[in-house]
Amino acid sequence: MLLMLCCVFCLQILSQQNADAVYVSNIKTVKLFQQNNQESLPVLQLNSNDIIELHFDDLDGYVKNYYYTFVLCNADWQPADVSPFDYLKGYQIQRITQYRNSSIAQTNYIHYQAQLPESSCIPIKSGNYLLKVFLNGNMDQLMFAKKFYVVERRAGVAATMSQIIDVEKFSTHQKLKLKVALPEKDLFNVQQQVKLIVMQNNRTDNAYINIQPTYIRGNILEYDNTNELIFEGGNEYRWADLRSFRFLSERIDKVIQPNDVYLKPDVNRLQQRYLYMKDLNGYYDVSTTESINPWWQTEYGKVHFTYVPPNNKAYANNDVYLLGELTGNEISDTSKMIFNEDKGVYEKELYLKQGYYSYTYGTKNNIDKQANATFALTEGNYWETENDYQIFVYFRPLNARHDELIALSVFNSKNVGL
């Protein structure tokens, strides 16, 4: 019995941490984003005409019956204690009817897509949502889940950025200061009713979750604690132009047919001076230079990443991770690199669709399980680095049964006030 309880508890933790997850190997390149913008969070304004796009491929290569549903969640991504009849207008389950066979590409796959929400299934409450896609109308055959957000903008967020007084972090870290203007209605207990989550470049491993305000002035919350909202600056993301497997871009070393793509080895950048380069902050764009439609006319390839550590020796007590949207922006087995003793390098192979990818390398202490991933050993940390920060403000009115999302703001470190 104790073992069963432990297993259930572990599954609950995994469910919470891996809300974005693909559960079967034949599903690839799952993308969910604001209409016509692959480099965006999937966000809908409540009671608006906003659209988010869903795209994914099934490498089994024959048509299947895929369905989806929306699940309302709280700020911690646990399902809310609310009936679907109360947060969805229309049917709870919808079939994905748009699909097309791949063409031109050697890889045979079916591309599925949908524009959400459809008129027959509309979220009517703000908050965190999981899009769950399953097979044959059977929710037990879950293929993948993706996060998206429905926001009812009833709060204002202002952000400033400053260098840290601490001499050790002055040139390497970025610190945010936030002010949140709340709606005065139903505001009785700020500490319990308001939850703030701040992420850097969509990463969850180093996010600040549910921190408390430093000052409360009426309905204005100020977050200016000396030891909070401090992030490593990191470095500009690396890039790989995989829009063609025939004409080799600057970052491709060689292509061995059929479509084994070897990128040029990456080295640590600790000795390099900071240089600003426009990047995608971890996103990737499905695109190609060789056909018209990138969604069903692009190829798949085995892409080999290589990271060369100093002196070709493995980092002591640290694992190396390949981070970005291409690995789900999470510290997991999907992103963990394997050290090749014979070559003295870290290696990772991913099966990727043609496109333009941004990525970075981080290390995590494998003894201290509470330690965050760091760029200090691989990329270097620079205060000047351009990063995106996502700020989520949740509010729970009295007697409500879920966390409402009342503000969602994205700030860029190059543009935020100082």
Image: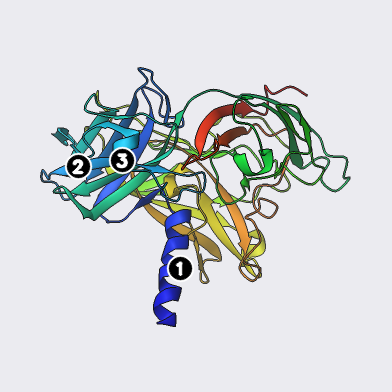
- What amino acid type should be assigned to the residue bearing mark 1? Phe
For discs 3 and 1, the disc positioned in front in the rendered view: 3
Choose top left, top right, bottom left or bottom right for residue 213: top right
For the residues labelled 3 and 1, the Cα–Cα distance comes to: 25 Å
Is residue 235 visible in the rendered structure shown here? yes
What is the quadrant of the C terminus in the image?
top right
Q: Is mark 2 on a helix, strand or loop?
A: strand
- Asked if the residue at tag 1 contacts the one at tag 3, i.e. Cβ–Cβ closer than 8 Å, the answer is no
Query: Depth check: 53 or 356 in front?
Result: 53
In the drawing, does residue 44 fall left or right of residue 266? left
Q: Is mark 3 on a helix, strand or loop?
A: helix
What is the quadrant of the N terminus in the image?
bottom left
On screen, residue 368 above or below 195: below
Which residue has dot 3 on it? 84
For the residues labelled 2 and 1, the Cα–Cα distance comes to: 28 Å
- Asked if the residue at tag 1 contacts the one at tag 2, i.e. Cβ–Cβ closer than 8 Å, the answer is no
Residue 208 position within the rendered picture, expressed as x and y whole percent measured from the top left:
64, 46
Q: What element carries label 1?
A: helix
For the residues labelled 3 and 2, the Cα–Cα distance comes to: 16 Å
In the drawing, does residue 253 fall left or right of residue 159? left
- What amino acid type should be assigned to the residue bearing mark 2? Tyr
Which residue has dot 2 on it? 67
Residue 283 position within the rendered picture, expressed as x and y whole percent measured from the top left:
47, 36
**Farthest-out residue, top:** 49
**Number of disc labels:** 3
Number of other residues with Cα within 10 Å of mark 2, as a class: few under 14, some 14 to 19, many 20 or more: many
**Which colour style is shown?**
rainbow
**Farthest-out residue, front:** 399
Which residue has dot 1 on it? 9
| Residue shown at the point (38%, 18%) measured from the top left | 48
Number of other residues with Cα within 10 Å of mark 3, as a class: few under 14, some 14 to 19, many 20 or more: some
